């Protein structure tokens, strides 16, 4: 168990009950007026370190059957005046000609900045009118890129009204907490819902499961990120993000009595011209949200209720949580088989853990090793429909659907298309 000196106070039982009510009132409810909406919450453009114009990026997502998108550039909102130099190799030879061909010289504003050819980037308010309609939504987003010492700590804020400056902090946990608090403060002050989530926890090996367990009121993190440098799968010393997810939720639910952490899949795309495993391309990860309407408040409300799944390719037609039974129904592709793993932790929990050590036996600052009973595979089923009926001693259950279809343009070898449903708790419906 966590060192008592590191523990923060438990959330009140009232807040847990509020979360459970939101879960039971939306997740698995009648869907006569609800629809599935596909979206990406994390991607980049010329406004920071992406390699294309936001209109070109937005069009890619809209024409590839996405319903909502947040272009989340680093420490900036797409507003005000920003010019991008148009003479470097990528922008001159690929991005600018394509941009001019698609949108024309009447739309593309060219000029000079300090004697160098440049293009003015359109603001979100300018270009959203080209794309938004009843079937497509753009969210005002930012990736707040913070750090502690040499450790990179990044956060995605969706549906912002104002830029969130990196607040810094006195420790890794303090930096994470301050970023969550900043988003909560803006949401409360403006009256607008803000989806705030922790990005790529294994990027730079900055975070451990033990770090994340200590953060109050955290709701979301990226269990899958499509960037080629974020280490989703871990390595010999570091656990995967999916293993991290189970360790965190076992502690949150079993020890802290907190609601479970919910898992997102995103692109984190930066490269839109050359598609290869070594580039951060679009189309590698997304969420599919069941909401009443395609509006920011409805999308965020459904995400907070856990009424969504994350995917790197598998399509799910329904997720039902009723009577302590979790059912997943998959939209099958011809010639493709599906294996559904139901994963969870049973009580009583084996809390024993040990540090990872170096060759001299010194503990390393990485996630500790825990019992295999934490995040255990409780059932494996083959087919386009799978169900798991809880015994009642599970702290939580989630499903991971693994396809026999290899992921197109995968970052890692042997990467199959997958989908992840959100953790549910026996007795919550």
Image (cartoon, rainbow, N blue to C red):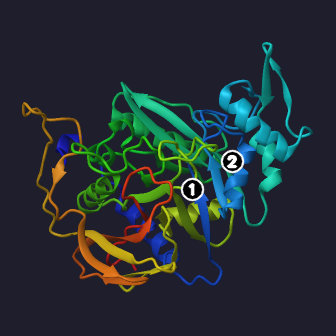
- Residue 87 position by quadrant: top right
| Residue plotted at (47% across, 47% down) | 277
Label 1 environment density (alpha carbons within 10 Å; few <14, some 14–19, many ≥20): many
- On the picture, is 367 further left or further right than 361? right
Report if residue 245 is visible in the image.
yes
- Residue 359 x/y as whole percent: 9, 33
Label 2 environment density (alpha carbons within 10 Å; few <14, some 14–19, many ≥20): many
- Residue 57 x/y as whole percent: 69, 47
- Residue 379 x/y as whole percent: 26, 78
> Do tag 2 and tag 1 residues touch (Cβ < 8 Å)?
no
Q: Mark 2 highlights which residue? A: 57
- Residue 201 position by quadrant: top left
Residue 283 badge: 1
Mark 2 and mark 1 lie on one chain; the one further toward the N terminus is: 2
Q: Where 386 sits versus 203, above or below? A: below
- Nearest to the observer: residue 233 or residue 13: 233
Disc 2 is placed on an element classified as: helix
- Residue 92 x/y as whole percent: 73, 30
Q: Where 51 sits versus 339, above or below? A: above
Single out the residue that lies furthest toward the top: 114
| Residue plotted at (70% across, 59% down) | 62
Q: Where 156 sits versus 363, above or below? A: below
Single out the residue that lies furthest toward the left: 360
- On the picture, is 165 further left or further right than 89? left
| Residue plotted at (57% across, 52% down) | 41
- On the picture, is 315 further left or further right than 129? left
Disc 1 is placed on an element classified as: loop
Report if residue 122 is visible in the image.
no
């Amino acid at each position: 168990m966590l060192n008592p000196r590191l523990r923060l106070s438990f959330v009140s039982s009232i807040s847990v009950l509020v979360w459970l009510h939101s879960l039971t009132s939306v997740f698995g409810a009648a869907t006569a007026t609800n629809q599935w909406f596909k979206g990406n919450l994390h991607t980049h453009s010329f406004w920071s370190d992406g390699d294309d114009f936001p209109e070109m990026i937005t069009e890619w997502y809209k024409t590839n059957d996405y319903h909502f998108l947040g272009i989340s550039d680093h420490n900036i909102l797409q507003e005000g005046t920003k010019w991008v130099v148009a003479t470097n190799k990528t922008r001159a030879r690929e991005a600018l000609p394509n941009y001019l061909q698609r949108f024309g010289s009447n739309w593309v504003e060219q000029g000079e900045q300090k004697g160098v050819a440049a293009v003015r980037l359109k603001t979100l308010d300018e270009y959203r009118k080209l794309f938004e309609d009843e079937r497509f939504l753009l969210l005002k987003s930012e990736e707040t890129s913070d750090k502690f010492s040499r450790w990179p700590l990044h956060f995605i804020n969706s549906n912002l009204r104002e830029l969130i400056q990196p607040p810094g902090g006195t420790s890794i946990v303090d930096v994470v907490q301050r970023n969550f608090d900043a988003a909560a403060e803006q949401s409360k002050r403006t009256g607008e819902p803000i989806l705030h989530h922790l990005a790529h926890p294994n990027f730079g090996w900055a975070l451990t499961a033990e770090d994340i367990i200590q953060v109050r009121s955290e709701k979301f993190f990226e269990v899958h990120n499509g960037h080629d440098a974020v280490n989703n799968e871990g390595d010999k010393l570091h656990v995967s993000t999916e293993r991290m997810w189970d360790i965190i939720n076992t502690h949150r639910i079993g020890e802290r009595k907190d609601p479970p952490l919910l898992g997102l899949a995103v692109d984190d795309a930066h490269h839109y011209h050359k598609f290869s495993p070594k580039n951060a391309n679009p189309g590698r990860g997304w969420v599919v949200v069941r909401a009443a309407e395609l509006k920011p408040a409805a999308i965020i409300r459904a995400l907070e209720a856990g009424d969504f799944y994350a995917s790197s390719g598998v399509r799910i037609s329904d997720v039902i949580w009723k009577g302590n039974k979790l059912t997943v129904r998959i939209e099958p592709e011809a010639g493709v088989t599906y294996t559904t793993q139901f994963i969870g932790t049973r009580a009583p929990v084996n809390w024993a853990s040990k540090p990872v050590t170096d060759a001299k036996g010194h503990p390393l600052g990485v996630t500790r090793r825990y019992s295999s009973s934490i995040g255990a595979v409780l059932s494996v089923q083959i087919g386009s429909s799978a169900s798991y009926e809880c015994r009642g001693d599970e702290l939580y259950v989630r499903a991971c659907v693994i396809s026999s279809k290899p992921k197109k343009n995968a970052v890692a070898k042997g990467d199959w298309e997958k989908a992840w449903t959100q953790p549910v708790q026996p007795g919550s419906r």
